[in-house]
Amino acid sequence: QPHGFGKAPVNIALSKYWGKRDSVLNLPMNGSVSISLPGLGTETTVQPFGGQQDQIELNGQVLDHSVVFAKRLSQFLDFFRSAACPAFRVVTQNSVPTAAGLASSASGYAALVVALDDLFGWQLAKTELSLLARLGSGSASRSLFDGFALWHKGERPDGMDSFAESVDSVWPEFCIGLVKVNTQEKAVGSTLGMQQTVETCDLYQSWPPQAQRDLETITQAIIQQDFHTLAKTAEHNALSMHATMIATWPPIVYWQPESIAAMQIVWRLREQGVAVYFTMDAGPNLKLILQTQDQAIVQQAFAEQSTPVEFILPFQRQ
Ligand code: PMV
């Protein structure tokens, strides 16, 4: 029985994707740029399946077809069915980060398209795989790459120019800290959250131009390895995105009291001269942006508030 294998890392956006101009093709209102986290992600095998429906196994458990995760995955697989392969068996394993709050849909759809490419022997370029992964989940377009990735907004209505590519930079001191303040499922998924924001938030009109500007600033800062510009723009970008979420109706507030407490630790450290910043996605957890030289002092400040931080060095392979 032929099968295909793929793996992909999770990624964290430094300039965010928030809002779709086409919700079928997952075409974004603005481009985004991210950093992938090696060692955290998804491994998937896919093979033709004899049954009537797909068989989808997640972390060792076969999922019922009514589970949202399985439904969405089968819908994505509809693009790839044929008479020879009417159904698939998909076995997918997410590496479990001790600090959660990471989007598994991004690494999940990226790993799946890599596995499909292997199964069918397409030998597509990464930018082409990125286009396909985007159809599963927008942020998945960025998970085909290690290091920094830039997802182009694109202009075309068919989305053929909306894919991600690598931003070349090896930056050994660049460090991400995962701060888990809450493990609960997010209240509002990103698809619904984006839709509601685009439809009901008057502030939203300022978001796409700001995000495009931030994207350019951050991409330049990556190339020049200008940490301060990168990190400060990323924090401002994340808070601006959350401002649009809060100003929707009904309001979407992903923050918990512990999120704000963690922000205050970051801001206090900055007042003391430590170059640490944060970003946040559609959930309550913080992702710190810092350099290796400040790891110990950041770790200690969070430990004093009984908050563990898991540090990841994207350019130092374990
Ligand atoms: O790709 P989605 O639909 O899971 O949306 C991701 C949205 C954010 O994580 C909030 C921002 C981003 O660019 O990753």
Image (cartoon, rainbow, N blue to C red):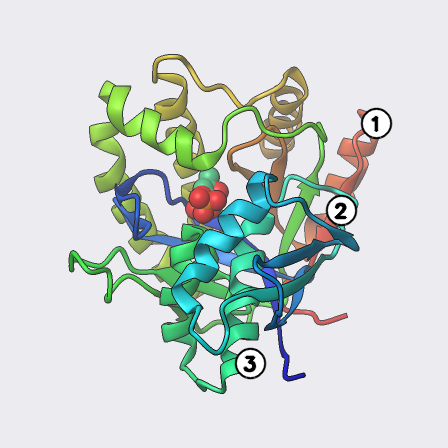
Mark 1 C-beta to ligand 1 under 8 Å? no
Quadrant where the C terminus is found in the figure = bottom right
Image position of 168 (left or right of 276)? left
Q: Which residue position is annotated with label 1?
A: 306
Is residue 12 visible in this depiction of the protein? no
Q: Splitting the image into four quadrants, where does ligand 1 fall?
A: top left
Residue 123 locus on image (x, y percent):
45, 86
Residue 157 locus on image (x, y percent):
16, 56
Is mark 2 in CB contact (under 8 Å) with mark 3?
no
Q: Which residue position is annotated with label 3?
A: 119
Q: Earlier in the sequence, mark 2 or mark 3?
A: 3
Numbered badge on residue 310: 2
The residue carrying pointer 2 sits among few (fewer than 14), some (14 to 19) or many (20 or more) residues within 10 Å by Cα, namely: some
Which residue is at a point 41% across and 36% down the rendered structure image?
A: 191
Amino acid bearing label 3? Leu
Between 88 and 129, the one lying in front of the other is: 88
Is mark 1 in CB contact (under 8 Å) with mark 3?
no
Quadrant where the N terminus is found in the figure = bottom right
Is mark 2 in CB contact (under 8 Å) with mark 1?
no
Classify 227 as above or below 254. below
Outermost residue toward the top in this view: 250
Question: In terms of secondary structure, where does tag 2 sit?
Answer: strand
Q: Marks 1/3: CA distance? A: 47 Å
Image position of 272 (left or right of 136)? right
